């Protein structure tokens, strides 16, 4: 099978979507399928990439670590004349996502869209952020989903949310797979030795982009409260981003800066070592569509303390593989950390069985099979649809129609946002 993927983030960018695309494509290739990935250029990207087409992009858009693709620059002249994908898989509903729709129409093949992100949580990266813009983004992603043949939701929570928002296209729940071998191989002692932290020192850890949408100021205050009650404990923060300075400032204000360790971005063996170095994983984001870092921590044997949110509640069972808290309460979060450490002290294997069940459920082999089943069901459907066997003129009309639908979707999204604003004004008046 020839699968063409479109993503606005990819290696070496560090983030959930980039990791998801990288893992899935590698697993599909290992199963004997060819995967061609279209992605933006990034600084320090690999020089030699097989079946990866890079599109020129503006680096570090608006101060973020994202790259903004330049959609007017075409890459299609780099494709062989006989190039015919079986499946097109879009991982974003804009920029390169638009291109995915147009090529799906041109080649007459199904388009799958994975709704990785709650996009309205990221509008602060765009100048003029407002409630209107959030509504626009929601309508845009919903309209895009309805122009695709199938939507993959990475969690049941996301499936329910997007259905309520108006996605009528068939939705299948398939989480990003976990490469169990990658995260089982770590040696935590290496990182602890480098930081000068003894093997028996209680170690709280967090891994991820240090960005505003991750709710990290709350996390730092909550973990800081725990560190003040347990003066032997330390906090490991793996990742980088604009929130790092604020977290460091809070740690200083709380008097725990000397026990808070920022490593920056880690990958490969160093990341696996970091996961194995910590005892309890702490997580406060409410913008996730799935708990990727939670399952990675669980694969390394760490129970999790987190806030109840989409993507979290699918993998975290309160009292079994960690603690899940209903609201943002620093004292309760600190108490949950203390409870988890106490249970580990009494029985170091207390959480092992529950952690293992989650890890097996989210294994990459398991999720890849689900994705292939989704692809196969679409190809079976296409094979029975007479409309896909069009002549060149009909194919051209299809492409033109798809281009119109893309722009109509943008206009509809904007109109809905503006209409909502007018209704709010009328209510207030």
Image (cartoon, helix red, strand yellow):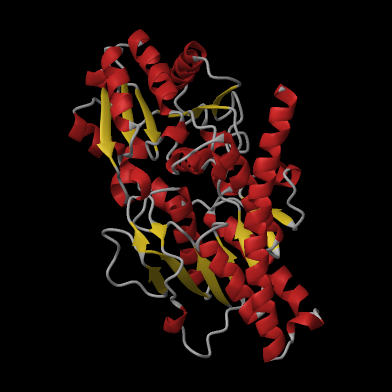
Q: Is residue 185 above or below residue 424?
A: below
Residue name at image x 69 percent, y 29 percent: 425
Q: Nearer the viewer, residue 99 or 136?
A: 136
Splitting the image into 4 quarters, where does residue 47 fall?
Answer: bottom left
- Asked if residue 173 lies left or right of residue 5, the reply is right
Residue name at image x 74 percent, y 81 percent: 388
Q: Residue furthest top?
A: 229
Residue name at image x 57 percent, y 57 percent: 93
Q: Quadrant of the N terminus?
A: bottom right
Q: Is residue 186 visible to the viewer in this orientation of the structure?
A: no
Q: What percent of the width, then of the height, locates residue 179?
A: 47, 53
Q: Nearer the viewer, residue 261 or 204?
A: 261
Q: What percent of the width, then of the height, locates residue 205?
A: 37, 30
Q: Is residue 47 above or below residue 353?
A: below
Splitting the image into 4 quarters, where does residue 357 fall?
Answer: top right
Q: Is residue 292 visible to the viewer in this orientation of the structure?
A: yes
- Asked if residue 327 lies left or right of residue 72, the reply is right
Q: What percent of the width, then of the height, locates residue 54?
A: 38, 69
Q: Nearer the viewer, residue 123 or 255?
A: 123
Residue name at image x 58 percent, y 79 percent: 85
Q: Is residue 397 above or below residue 166?
A: below
Count of labels shown? Answer: 0
Q: What percent of the width, then of the height, locates residue 267?
A: 32, 49
- Asked if residue 271 lies left or right of residue 159, the reply is left
Q: Quadrant of the C terminus?
A: top right
């Amino acid at each position: 099978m020839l699968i063409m993927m479109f993503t606005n983030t990819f290696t070496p960018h560090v983030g959930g979507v980039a990791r998801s695309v990288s893992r899935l494509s590698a697993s599909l290739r290992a199963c004997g399928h060819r995967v061609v990935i279209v992605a933006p250029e990034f600084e320090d990207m690999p020089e030699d990439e097989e079946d990866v087409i890079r599109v020129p992009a503006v680096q570090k858009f608006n101060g973020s670590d994202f790259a903004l693709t330049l959609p007017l620059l075409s890459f299609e002249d780099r494709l062989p004349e006989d190039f015919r994908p079986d499946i097109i898989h879009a991982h974003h509903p804009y920029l390169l996502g638009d291109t995915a729709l147009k090529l799906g129409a041109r080649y007459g093949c199904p388009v799958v869209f994975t709704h990785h992100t709650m996009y309205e949580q990221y509008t602060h990266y765009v100048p003029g952020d407002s409630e209107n813009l959030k509504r626009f983004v929601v309508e845009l992603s919903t309209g895009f989903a309805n122009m695709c043949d199938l939507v993959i939701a990475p969690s049941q929570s996301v499936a329910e949310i997007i259905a309520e928002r108006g996605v009528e296209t068939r939705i299948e729940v398939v989480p990003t797979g976990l490469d169990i071998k990658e995260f089982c191989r770590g040696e935590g002692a290496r990182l602890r030795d480098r930081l000068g932290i003894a093997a028996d020192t209680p170690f709280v850890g967090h891994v991820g982009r240090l960005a505003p949408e991750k709710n990290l100021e709350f996390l730092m205050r909550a973990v800081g409260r725990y560190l003040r009650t347990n003066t032997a404990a330390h906090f490991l923060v793996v990742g980088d981003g604009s929130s790092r300075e604020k977290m460091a400032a809070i740690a200083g204000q709380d008097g725990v800066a000397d026990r808070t360790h920022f490593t920056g971005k880690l990958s490969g063996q160093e990341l696996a070592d970091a996961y194995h170095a910590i005892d309890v994983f702490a997580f406060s984001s409410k913008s996730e569509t799935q708990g990727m870092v939670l399952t990675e921590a669980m694969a390394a044997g760490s129970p999790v303390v987190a806030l109840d949110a989409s993507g979290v509640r699918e993998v975290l069972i309160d009292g079994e593989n960690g603690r899940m808290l209903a609201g943002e309460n620093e004292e309760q979060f600190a108490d949950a950390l203390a409870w988890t450490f106490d249970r580990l002290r009494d029985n170091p294997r207390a959480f092992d069985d529950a952690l293992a069940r989650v890890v097996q459920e989210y294994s990459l082999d398991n999720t890849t099979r689900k994705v292939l089943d989704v692809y196969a069901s679409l190809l079976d459907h296409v094979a029975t649809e007479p409309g896909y066997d069009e002549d060149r003129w009909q194919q051209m009309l299809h492409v033109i129609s798809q281009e119109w639908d893309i722009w109509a979707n943008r206009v509809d999204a904007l109109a809905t946002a503006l209409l909502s604003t007018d209704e709010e004004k009328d209510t207030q008046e």
